[in-house]
Image: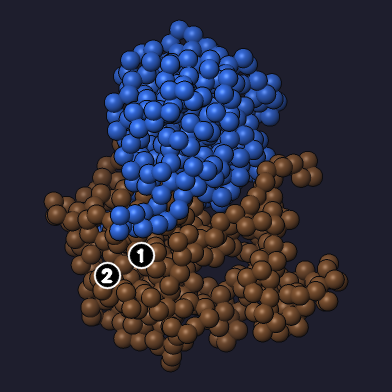
Chain colours: A brown, B blue
Amino acid sequence: MVRTLAAMTVLALASVLPTAAQDLPSWNDGAAKKSIVDFVTAVTTQGGSDFVEPADRIAVFDNDGTLWSEQPMYVQLAFVLDRVKALAPEHPEWKDTEPFKSVLAGDMKGVAAAGMKGLVEIVAATHSGMTSDEFSRIATDWIASAKHPTTGKPYTSMIYQPMRELVSYLKDNGFKVFIVSGGGIEFMRPWTERVYSIPAENVVGSSIKTKYEMRDGKPAVVRLPEIDFIDDEAGKPVGIAKFIGKRPIAAFGNSDGDFQMLEWTTAGDGRRFGLIVHHDDGEREVAYDRDSHFGKLAKGLDEGPKRGWTIVSMKNDWKQVFPE
Amino acid sequence: MVRTLAAMTVLALASVLPTAAQDLPSWNDGAAKKSIVDFVTAVTTQGGSDFVEPADRIAVFDNDGTLWSEQPMYVQLAFVLDRVKALAPEHPEWKDTEPFKSVLAGDMKGVAAAGMKGLVEIVAATHSGMTSDEFSRIATDWIASAKHPTTGKPYTSMIYQPMRELVSYLKDNGFKVFIVSGGGIEFMRPWTERVYSIPAENVVGSSIKTKYEMRDGKPAVVRLPEIDFIDDEAGKPVGIAKFIGKRPIAAFGNSDGDFQMLEWTTAGDGRRFGLIVHHDDGEREVAYDRDSHFGKLAKGLDEGPKRGWTIVSMKNDWKQVFPE
């Protein structure tokens, strides 16, 4: 009863307090920040025409390039390359077999030449065979020690402070926040709670198939060398429908891989919100869009503004890029 | 700040209050109730050797036969049969085609004779072709009006009051509660929050494939006539690993379809809890186990006690079966 009363107090206070723009200290005042605060105010104002019940306040965030850096390469690609090196002693044949040969030689052009087929081979060889629990430990250990190739910082320091504030701001306003990433679901889950305050079960991503079996006399979920689901482009709305089961009212991305997620989200009834982070800050981060190999953004830049999506200029809209 | 203080108050109170056995008023005092309260007390007692962080307090519940009635047939089967009747005018050929012919004639033996292949055909014909949003409305409308064949009550009244109290008790103690059902994920999601206080995104179940496409000029997730995933037996640990990404510390079921879920849950490190609802109350509900077509329970009865699982006798452990 005491707990219930206290919980009701929280709810009551939350509904009368103004939406706090001071919760976004790393955002410069301007159109982008205003569009966020206006949207959140509208959908949380009880009695307003745009009010949305908390259960339906679903917000989805892409990860690579939206919540953390994806340059000079996807973090998970760095993980995969490190895994090939770590596993090489057990696979002497890799020295003479592409695409492993190129990985071991540090020849990124050779890796790229192997294309998607080569990448799937590398992922299958490095991401399967172990149990889910074992893979989770491998990912946890790697993320704790690996360093970003240009800054030398841990990858979990290469996250965008303004976006982290945005996640907290939405959660404080009763939103349920999910990651919807093209990256591997089990690669992200071990650390998203600690780094973004987004729990493991709120992560949607690409996955490989698994199988339940007895291993060394103990029941285990074992990872198989077969792709189950690619959570990118048109796969993102499919992943959201499957894992979350509701159409979001707000979507945040940075590349054309997020286009369909923003399209589906903002085409729903009632007030909706779409936002694209534009990497235009070559000084504090990396400037890239239409011609980038990772995180290509062209359609979103052309179509987004016509659809009412907010285009965030990292250079102009963010006071600060990384935490410190 | 005020919100933060109030939230901290809730957390502080929650951690010092004793686990409240009075939260389980429909449970008779006895070994089953005691095992639940002992487990919850152990994993929530800060500083105790069995303490588990709230983020890892994952509890999973089967639905059919565990949270609501599965007799005289699975509720979703009643839904499917009603859908065949509703769609029959658009399919004159069904009058002469099995298994639809048997469904329309009310010949359940004929339906059963069509086996799993027939059932998949019926599900494909009635559960696909529409968008996810449309299917959600169809399920919502049906559950609001359909009546249980023997009691004449809405199906959402045929839920087990003691299990609903158990869900609340776990949530009050910081657990994250999920449904992990062999039933269709999109059939359950529209009403689980209202009926069980379990939100849509915390539902894991069987699913069919979907596809993102433009339909009548609007983006939509469209349901395809193809099974994506069967969340039963060995599929349950796989579904949990995929959707939740953590091994639960407590699992609740009633049939051998739940065996692997309980096995995997209770084989983990640290304190674990497994519980099987035994339908032994022919007066207040239906008595069935080893020979039942729906919800067969044999292995769980034989193996469960040896593994330390709690076997709940509906007859002896529950003061009340249904809400009122």
Image spot of residue A113 (x, y percent): 67, 80
Please give the name of the residue rendered at 66% of the width and 66% of the height, measured from the top-left corner.
A120
Q: Chain of mark 2?
A: A
As displayed, is residue B143 above or below residue B72? Answer: below
Image spot of residue B293 (x, y percent): 57, 18
Which residue is under mark 1?
Answer: A262
Distance in Å between CA atoms under marks 1 and 2 = 10 Å
Q: Residue furthest bottom?
A: A283
Residue A160 relative to residue B112: left or right: left
Contact (Cβ within 8 Å) of mark 1 with mark 2: yes
Q: Earlier in the sequence, mark 1 or mark 2?
A: 1
Q: Which mark is residue A307?
A: 2
Please give the name of the residue rendered at 85% of the width and 71% of the height, measured from the top-left corner.
A93
Res A114 quadrant in image: bottom right
As displayed, is residue A137 above or below residue B228? Answer: below
Residue closer to the observer: A199 or A227: A227
Please give the name of the residue rendered at 53% of the width and 81% of the height, measured from the top-left corner.
A293
Q: Residue furthest right?
A: A92
As displayed, is residue B95 above or below residue B38? Answer: above
Image spot of residue B299 (x, y percent): 67, 24
As displayed, is residue B4 above or below residue A76? Answer: above
